[in-house]
Amino acid sequence: MSEQEQSKPRREVMSRVDTAWLRMERPTNLMMITGVMMFDTPLSIEKFKKVIKQRFLAYPRFRQKAVDTPAGAWWQDDEDFDLDWHIRLTGLPGKAGKKELERLTSNLASTPLDQTKPLWQFHLVEKYNGGSALISRMHHCYADGIALVQVLLSLTDTTREAKKGSDLDKAWLKSDGEKVKKRIGTVDRAMKMGANLWEKGLDFYHDPSLATVIAKEGGEIARELAVALSLPDDPPTVLRGRLGVSKRVAWAEPLCLDEVKAIGRAYDCTVNDVLMASAAGALRSYMIDRGESVDGVTLRATVPVNLRPLEHAKKLGNHFGLVFLELPVGEENPVRRLEHVAENMRQLKSSRQAIVSFGLLAAMGLAPVGVQRTALELFSRKASAVATNVPGPPLPLYMAGCQITEQMFWVPQTGSIGIGISIMSYNNKVYFGLISDAKLLPDPDSVIQRFRPEFEKLLYAAMMGDWDDTIYSDDAEAYCGGHAFKV
């Protein structure tokens, strides 16, 4: 190899799906995953930088920047890499409490990353609640939520005394095992079908030949594709509208995970079902207060489904598909809302909808810009929110000797979607967060504060064994779990 060739920065081709996420960036929706961790004691920036050097940068990808051209996208080593640019020290004004931290996180979630550098940053916040806070920003093109959670957890230990590498036991991260393998085996077909559609310029909206394509392909993948494309747009509500460029974030006080599991056992459903039904109730209450007529209204949220085998959890890249989950905001009875969500999720788990969306995302990575924008708008009109639930470890974690007391994250929205719902479990607690477009929902805390009351309706019903529509309504008052709330 010549000296000139050795001096060239190393580069590699970006995957199709990662390219799609890179190109989805819009001023109104930045493709950035934003997270926040709170610590019980002050986190030293020198110790934190040491952790980043030893563990985070052990992933070579984070020394690379994304380069996008009409001919394709690739990862390229940043010859001017400067760790000080990626790790910033900051403080909070006034009382330096939760509201001030939410405001700073909102501002950072609204600020694009520098496209000429590797697309990630950490902002260490000093003097927060007697300790510190850490805000992370990473572009979605690097990896999906499952992978990035693994990356961040690799920076932690299970004791205050830092050890070489992470000693965290990943047994808590569940895998679908054989189900995931079966999904992977059918992804190639979905990618080929998606590519065929993009080559046609998405004319299937007006082109009856789509039926011919589906008939030719046959099988579940083709049928799921037809279902996905035929979904009607989500109804116009206060949760949809013209987006701005500013985001607002908020998070709720945590729930006890054991109580969530108790409701799941009482109604034979999952933890995720309980939490999404609670979120649907919170949105319903907010919409009613905004004067919205919700009778019979059902909204959709796009929900990611992991397509990554457990043994590949530490690898970067995006390996997930999306499904459309129904949120029955028009249902007044909280138990029936839960039953609706649980049944819809069971149907989605047995479908191939996630594989179809993965194939379409992969094909979008190679599609012309105009086709990609059309496709993005087409699919984003079918949902009003993005919803993500990431299971975290059941034990307390430490970073550079400081215990993580709370943590939350927010995933980006796509196209015309302006609401993001985030749920994360950690140390036997469940954290609920919301990110919203500031023009659409300027005060996400007005939704956040309704989440616990909606959850406690289900807890009350589980304890009592029933929920009586004739006694309990949206306007009634009740008391449960130490909290007064509307039922």
Image (tube, helix red, strand yellow):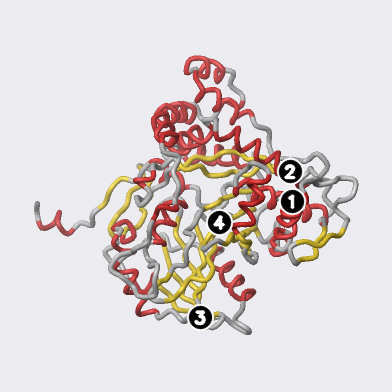
- The residue type indicated by label 2 comes to Arg
Picture quarter containing residue 244?
bottom right
Question: For the residue marked with disc 1, what is the amino acid?
Answer: Gly
Q: Give residue 181's position: percent from left, percent from top.
A: 39, 34
Crowd rating for badge 4 (residues with CA inside 10 Å; few <14, some 14–19, many 20+):
few
| Residue at 59% in and 58% down | 257
Query: Looking at the rendered structure, which numbered label has been put on residue 100?
Result: none
Q: Position of residue 332 (x, y in %)?
A: 81, 46
Q: Quadrant of residue 479?
A: bottom right
The disc at residue 337 is 2
State whether residue 200 is above or below residue 39.
Answer: above
Determine the CA span between mark 3 and mark 4.
Answer: 34 Å
The mark closer to the camera, 4 or 2, is 2
Q: Measuring 51% from the left and 42% from the top, which residue is drawn there? A: 305
Residue lying farthest right?
470
**1 and 4 marks in contact (CB < 8 Å):** no
Label 3: few (<14), some (14–19) or many (≥20) C-alpha neighbours in 10 Å: some
In what element is the residue under mark 4?
A: loop
Give the CA separation, mark 1 to mark 3.
Answer: 34 Å
Q: Position of residue 446 (x, y in %)?
A: 73, 63
Q: Are marks 2 and 1 in contact (CB under 8 Å)?
A: yes
Disc 3: which residue: 131
Secondary structure under tag 3 reads strand
